[in-house]
Image (spheres, grey):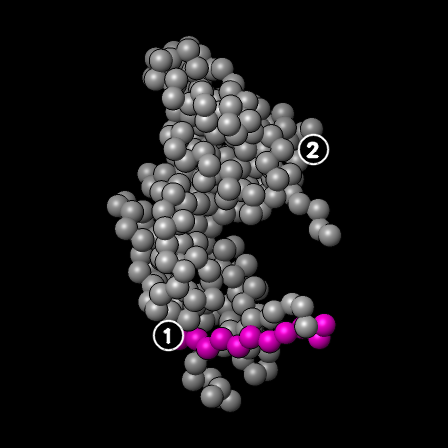
Amino acid sequence: MAVEKRFAVLIDADNVSEKYVKFILDEISNDGVATIKRIYGDWTKTTMGSWKNVLLDNSIMPIQQYGYTTGKNATDSAMIIDAMDLLYTGNIEGFCIVSSDSDFTRLAARLRESGMYVVGMGEKKTPNAFIAACNKFKYLEILAQAPNLPDDQTSASTVEVNGVDHTSLEEVRSTIRTIVDETSDDDGWAALGDVGNILNKRYPDFDVRNYGFKKLTPFINSLKAFEIRCSRSKDGHVRLIFVREKGRRGAK
């Protein structure tokens, strides 16, 4: 059995609402185990009172950080220092940085340079520079909407979240076509899992939920440019899914 990645989840309370905490922790559980959960802010402020029950219910450690100077965000510095301390302990394999602040761009890049897997999460206002610095990035508004998505649909349509500039469907379709061509066998079939992994590497913020889907297979089907083939492994236990561009010679 594969060992799950251990993650440090660091949340910037100045840039994130408590309503997203459950979605944040549920999402990171898809990548590994959140062994460290910390949130940074000035907890002496009365406006932070709504966080209390959320932190207790989710076993998140609040880190007190006073705002020493007006106009300066001391929370960012505290998170960055903690992240570097955690990096050198060697007890984790990944970081989840939850903020919509571009100040964490260099931190994400530095952690990746050290071999860490970095997941970013933030609201629609998050700058592209921070998104690109992460291995993958998730929009909090999309995560909050995901449980209400239909199980299946016939066509892709960008989820209505004002201000989120998703990669266009045409660009995604073109990229999938390129990936399939690069990774396919002689008959044009490529493993769907490989296609999905490469797609995420090329677009850190790619998520089928951005287009109203819960899974990759129905999303690719909706693009009307590919055919899907399913089979079982020799032992019959593993379901294998392959994708091929329609119209390829030899395709039905």
Say few, some or many: other residues with alpha carbon within 10 Å of mark 1 (under 14 / 14 to 19 / 20 or more). Answer: few
Above or below, comparing residue 206 to residue 52 in the picture: below
Residue 132 lies, in percent from the top left, at 45, 46
Q: Residue at x 52, y 18 (%)?
A: 63
Residue 102 makes an appearance in the image? no
Is residue 245 found inside the magenta-colored segment of the image? no
Above or below, comparing residue 145 to residue 44 in the picture: below
Amino acid identity at mark 2 = Asn
Identify the mark nearer the N-term, 1 or 2. Answer: 2
Residue 180 lies, in percent from the top left, at 51, 71
Which residue is tagged 2?
A: 91
Q: Residue at x 56, y 71 (%)?
A: 241
Which residue is tagged 1?
A: 224
Q: Secondary structure at mark 2?
A: loop
Q: Residue at x 37, y 58 (%)?
A: 150
Residue 130 lies, in percent from the top left, at 44, 39
Q: Residue at x 43, y 81 (%)?
A: 246
Q: Quadrant of residue 158?
A: bottom left
Q: Which residues are magenta?
A: 224-235
